Image: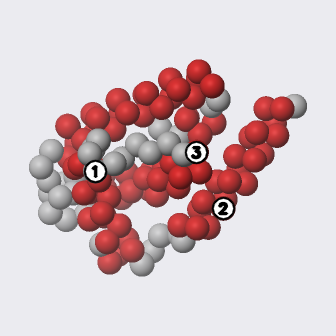
Amino acid sequence: MWEFFHKFGEEQQKAIENNFKILRTIEEHGLGDKRFFGGDQVGIADLVFGMVIHYFVPMEDVMGVKFIKVDTFPRLHAWMRHFSEHPVIKDNVPDYSRVVDYLKGYLDIINRMQKG
């Protein structure tokens, strides 16, 4: 899912389209009508996907591409809110702005490497 962050041009567009397919599958078949992937409580699947999302959302902001919007993926959007508001999660994730700063620096390195 992070491929869109490393690609440019047509390859990036393909990666973005692939992300929408992946997220649609997760929305339809992973979550269903449940609050969390396993039901009413945070489970291992939530923790794993939460780690992915914790970096994915700042990547959206850095790249200017928004995937998980309330009108596009309402269940995933609700899951993100429930997950991030859970006390155990809320008190133990890295600061959002630090993640964004790290990703901006990483993207800068990638861009410089692309230019040769």
In the figure, residue 9 lies in which quadrant? top right
Q: Which mark is residue 63?
A: 3
View extreme (left): residue: 33
Mark 3 or 2, closer to the camera? 3
Crowding near the residue tagged with mark 1, few <14, some 14–19, many ≥20 C-alpha atoms within 10 Å: few
Q: Quadrant of the C terminus?
A: top right
51 left or right of 108?
left
On screen, 56 above or below 18? below
Q: Residues within 10 Å of mark 3 (few under 14, many from 20)?
A: some
3D distance between C-alphas at marks 2 and 1: 26 Å
Q: Where residue 13 appears, x then y in whole percent?
A: 53, 26
Name the element at disc 2.
helix
- 10 Å neighbourhood of mark 2: few (<14), some, or many (≥20)? few
Q: Secondary structure at mark 3?
A: helix
Q: Amino acid at mark 3?
A: Met
Up/down of 5 relative to 61, above or below: above
